[in-house]
Image (tube, rainbow, N blue to C red):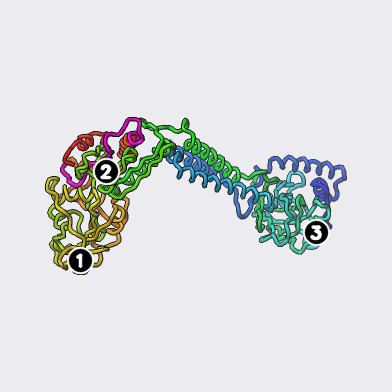
Amino acid sequence: MSIQEPGPYETATDLSRELLRQAYPDQPETWINEKADDAARSIKAAVSDQFQTSRYAVSYRRPLDIRRRIVLWGVAVAAVLVVGVVVFAGREWVTAALAQKSGVYAMAVITVLTLGTTIWLRIRERFEKVLSCRIRIDTRFGRFAGEALELTGPGATAVQDPGMVVVRVKNLSGAVIEPEDYIEPLRLRFPDRVVRTVEVTESEPPELQNIVADHSGFRTEPHSIALPAVPLAPDDSYYVVAILSGTEAGKQYSVTVLGRLRRGRITTESTIPWIRRRTIAVGAVATLAVSVLAVSLLLYNVRPFTPLPESTVCVDGSLAVEGSSAFGPATIAAANQYGTYCPGSHIDVRTPGSIEGLKRLHDAPVGERSNRLAVSDGMESLRFTELKGHPVAVIPFTLVANNNVPVAGLSLDQARDIFTGKVGTWGEITGDPALTADVRVVVRADNSGTRRTLQQYVLGTSIDPLTQAAPTSDDCEKRRQGAERASAVVCERGTTADVLNRIAAVNDAIGYADMGEVTRTTGVKPINLNGLKADLDSIQKGYPFWTVEYVYSYGEVADGSLAKAFIDYLSHYLLRVQTEAMKGPAQPDYFACGADPVRQLCARNDR
């Protein structure tokens, strides 16, 4: 039979009826109508089953297979479990962090960012252009119309294993999709099948089907259909009906949807959700952030919600704490946490050095003495008989050198020669005359408790301390004018941090500092002393470079005072930090006097 001009056909039944008329011209109209109705019922049933009989995808976002979905869900669940375990394991640290100002500020920033992201995603969704290319029907005609539809005429061939695909194209968004929005126009690909006829039908508005059908961009190829880049107002739609050959019974076929939109996307869904899943996910994170922020604000501002650590007594008022720079980080951290748990208190910590802190406490006006404390590396030796010491921790010190220094350990005699200025080059220490680099010694000033510990227990004895070499340089790189060439290059620094920064910056430099800060400083390395390193086990074996850390008050501290409350809190804080640190591979910075065997070390009077 001759190929006639297509449709338009209002329904799939009309199309089936016309195809049957052309395939079976000798059959009566009643037979044609009966078979067309059967085909329509089959097509309608196929709509609900199309996900089992047809697969389709958008080119830039392929659907996930079952295994990939399982993997992604597994990763998501594992991530949630890991976060949960980490939060649970570190719940005390998390609670303390949220209860501090920095924790509140951090959660406020996170909350603003997540809320802003959620709002931005929602606004983007509302204005995003979304073009739906939905496969409504993908079925075969074989059991209704025979194994072939015989189309006769010029160039016509039989449609072997005929099938029909119906596609609905619709603008789902609230914005007009213009021709220039198509980065790549829509294209339907039918792998393993051949396109025989195509028709555009059932459009909204009605004239749209003619615009699409007559457009120069509407083309058919053996295995694909190119749809034109036509303007579509919101809710505009049209159907594309394609007759294909090669649709074998019992075999599954796919339809691939290709194309790209500027400022939008192409989907194979029939509708778009009111809120997309990624917006819901970000919104959930934002909700969680808001909840955590609310809890942190309660922790920070409302005392009943603040979980006070054991033996913590809140006392309102102000307290000044001055002294050791080596012990400064621990004192500052304890003061910040105490202020978090007890918002009515204000503790100001400064680190001018142990001896300077003791002098300021001793010389304080009478009215201020009860509101001041001093932190000292070692027992007060200035004969300030009015000051009362409270041992809180053992602090290990270590010799420390620039990473390029050619030694990993020193004997006590070698350490004395270096820090009293008796040697000038590293070759004199190692015995290698080729090592002619100057020994550059970075030391603390005379207000330092760390320096006093070095002079008493490394260079000399507690009864007969030996003074370290006087400075011969301002920067440990150039000698001062008149300094002897044979002596070591020696410079002084006021704080532990300054000493470590200078050692890291100057080749061949050596100095001393507390072990905790050394481990956190890059570019430097600890130097063993007499084969022992600065840890608790070595201290018990005779390692000499350590001291007891004392908090001094002017006379006895009064019960119920902020000074008494803070000394008690500092002792328990150090013990908690030590307990947590001992669970990991690294040693704590300090060893609290409240734990054995440190209690016995803290009771020694020669430190």
Give the total of numbered labels. Answer: 3
Q: Which residue is mark 1?
A: 437
Q: On the rendered image, what quadrant is the C terminus found in?
A: top left
C-alpha gap between disc 2 and disc 3: 96 Å
Does the magenta portion include 240? no
- Tell me if residue 91 comes above or below residue 220 in the rendering: above
First in residue order: circle 1 vs circle 3: 3
The nearer-to-camera label among 1 and 3 is: 1
Element marked by disc 3: helix
- Which amino acid lies under the numbered mark 1 shown in the image of this protein? Ala
Residue 74's spot in the image, x, y percent?
50, 41
Q: Nearer the viewer, residue 536 or 498?
A: 498
Q: Residue at x 25, y 48 (%)?
A: 355
Disc 2 packing (10 Å; few <14; some 14–19; many ≥20): many
Hey, which quadrant is residue 181 in on the image? bottom right
Q: Which residue is mark 2?
A: 362
Residue 246's spot in the image, x, y percent?
69, 52
Q: Which residue is mark 3?
A: 211
The nearer-to-camera label among 2 and 3 is: 2
Q: Over which residues does the magenta segment extend?
A: 541-566
Q: Nearer the viewer, residue 91 or 310?
A: 310
Q: On the rendered image, what quadrant is the N terminus found in?
A: bottom right
First in residue order: circle 2 vs circle 3: 3
Element marked by disc 1: loop
The nearer-to-camera label among 2 and 1 is: 2
Q: Residue at x 74, y 62 (%)?
A: 217
Is residue 253 something one can see in this rendering?
Answer: no
- Which amino acid lies under the numbered mark 2 shown in the image of this protein? His
- Tell me if residue 197 comes above or below residue 77 in the rendering: below
Disc 3 packing (10 Å; few <14; some 14–19; many ≥20): some
